[in-house]
Image (spheres, rainbow, N blue to C red):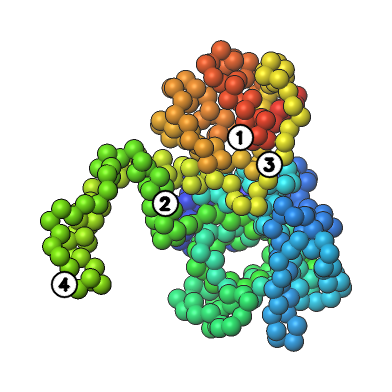
């Protein structure tokens, strides 16, 4: 899939460094095994759903328009019309075949994997020259798309547009991608893709939160820990306050007292890890889990031992040496249970044999049953991993 490169070689020579064009990243055999690609009709059907993010971008006589889905009442343009693009986000969350493709990119840590966006474009369609703040693999699924790319440092945007389009795009290289071809681009690499005839492209994207975003959410997390922090018990007092000559002035002593108190705030790598695991596994706002058929704990256990289990595609799970996170919840299970759950996260499921061998682990089946009832995992059926 990486053009003869091992994941180790790719990460060392290209990841976050230089583009890579890979002809026939997916062979015809791979495409058949992955039921690749999704049909345009199936993609358009997804764009009508409330629980799927979609956008329509069109260019008419040099004017760009941008609309959010769902497109269940507003019809899309005719597929015979030129210069429009439908973008559907998170297709891996609702299409098992696309999720299977996503799994092939797990040589990148799950903490960095985001989702698969699929774009369908009619002839001439595209979103204009732009850059992404994250790494992306652009996998051609249907038809042809011409890509022009540039390592330029000038990332100035055209003002007053509904899209982030580069004002001074200067292409340095150009490629036409056919079905199965793939182009990797590191962050902030300028690119412009234009459909030659109708085409479909899969974009495998990665999470790259800004440090400001992370810091803001971490401070919110930190505020929740103050309840148990003895350094912040009590209230502000000022027994030495003198009569105010200027009542409207903010007392300097009050500022100093709070500054001194805030100096007591401390965080460790362990606390940062606790925040990050919960933050990165928190489901996105539009994600909805599907309730599973109700089963008693005993019935669920019996079936899991026969069928195995699989994490739902929407479920986010991470772990470290002490903790396990799933969909924003934090657990600190004992060693044997943590090891089992870590394997569940790595494999995105557990075989019937793995479940059967572990049913005596304290709290395991109760935990899995609770997650099943939330829709976070399913019974996998015969032939599961």
Q: Position of residue 246 (x, y in %)?
A: 19, 73
What is the crowding at mark 4: few (fewer than 14 residues within 10 Å), some, or many (at least 20)? few
Which mark is nearer the camera, 1 or 3?
3
In the image, which disc is placed on residue 77? none
Q: Secondary structure at mark 2?
A: helix
Which residue is the site of mark 3? Answer: 289
Q: Nearer the viewer, residue 10 or 83?
A: 83
When asked about the image quadrant of residue 69, the answer is bottom right
In the image, which disc is placed on residue 220? 2
Which mark is nearer the camera, 4 or 3?
4
Q: Nearer the viewer, residue 316 or 9?
A: 316
Q: Position of residue 223 (x, y in %)?
A: 38, 48
User: In terms of sequence position, does the residue under pointer 1 or pointer 3 come before the other?
Assistant: 3
Tell me the distance, in whole angstroms, between the alpha carbons under discs 2 and 1.
30 Å
Q: Nearer the viewer, residue 153 or 42?
A: 42
- Residue drawn at x 71%, y 61% is 54
Which residue is the site of mark 1? Answer: 348
Residue 382 appears in the picture as rendered: yes
Q: Secondary structure at mark 3?
A: loop
What is the crowding at mark 3: few (fewer than 14 residues within 10 Å), some, or many (at least 20)? some
When asked about the image quadrant of residue 327, the answer is top right
Picture layout, residue 10 above or below residue 167 = above
Which residue is at the far top? 360
- Quadrant where the C terminus is found in the figure: top right
Tell me the distance, in whole angstroms, between the alpha carbons under discs 4 and 2.
37 Å
User: In terms of sequence position, does the residue under pointer 3 or pointer 2 come before the other?
Assistant: 2
Q: Are marks 4 and 3 in contact (CB under 8 Å)?
A: no
Picture layout, residue 310 above or below residue 50 = above
User: In terms of sequence position, does the residue under pointer 1 or pointer 4 come before the other?
Assistant: 4
Q: Nearer the viewer, residue 49 or 224?
A: 224
């Amino acid at each position: 899939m990486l053009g003869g490169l091992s994941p180790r070689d790719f990460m060392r020579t290209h990841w976050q460094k230089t583009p890579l064009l890979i002809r026939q990243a997916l062979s015809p055999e791979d495409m058949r095994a992955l039921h690749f690609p999704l049909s345009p009709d199936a993609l358009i059907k997804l764009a009508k759903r409330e629980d799927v993010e979609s956008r329509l971008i069109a260019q008419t006589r040099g004017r760009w328009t941008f609309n959010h889905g769902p497109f269940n009442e507003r019809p899309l343009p005719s597929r015979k019309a030129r210069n429009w693009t439908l973008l559907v986000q998170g297709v891996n969350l609702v299409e098992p075949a696309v999720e299977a493709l996503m799994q092939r990119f797990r040589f990148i840590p799950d903490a960095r994997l985001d989702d698969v966006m699929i774009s369908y474009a009619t002839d001439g369609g595209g979103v204009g020259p732009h850059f992404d703040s994250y790494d992306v693999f652009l996998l051609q699924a249907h038809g042809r798309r011409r890509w022009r790319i540039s390592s330029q440092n000038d990332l100035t945007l055209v003002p007053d547009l509904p899209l982030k389009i580069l004002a001074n795009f200067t292409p340095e290289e150009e490629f036409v991608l056919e079905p199965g071809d793939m182009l990797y681009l590191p962050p902030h690499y300028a690119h412009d893709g234009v459909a030659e005839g109708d085409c479909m492209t899969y974009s495998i994207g990665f999470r790259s939160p800004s440090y400001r975003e992370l810091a803001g959410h971490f401070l919110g997390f930190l505020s929740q820990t103050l309840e148990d922090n003895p350094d912040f018990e009590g209230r502000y007092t000022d027994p030495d306050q003198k009569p105010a000559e200027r009542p409207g002035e903010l007392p300097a002593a009050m500022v100093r007292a709070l500054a001194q108190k805030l100096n007591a705030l401390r965080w460790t790598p362990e606390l940062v890890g606790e925040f990050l695991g919960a933050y990165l596994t928190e489901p996105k706002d539009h994600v909805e889990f599907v309730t599973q058929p109700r089963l008693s704990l005993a019935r669920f256990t019996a079936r899991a031992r026969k069928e195995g289990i699989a994490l739902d595609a929407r479920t986010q799970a991470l772990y470290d040496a002490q903790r396990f996170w799933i969909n924003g919840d934090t657990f600190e299970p004992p060693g044997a249970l943590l090891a089992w759950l870590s394997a569940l996260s790595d494999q995105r499921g557990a075989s019937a044999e793995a479940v059967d061998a572990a049913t005596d682990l304290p709290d395991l089946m109760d935990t899995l049953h609770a997650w099943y009832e939330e829709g976070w995992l399913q019974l996998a059926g015969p032939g599961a991993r």
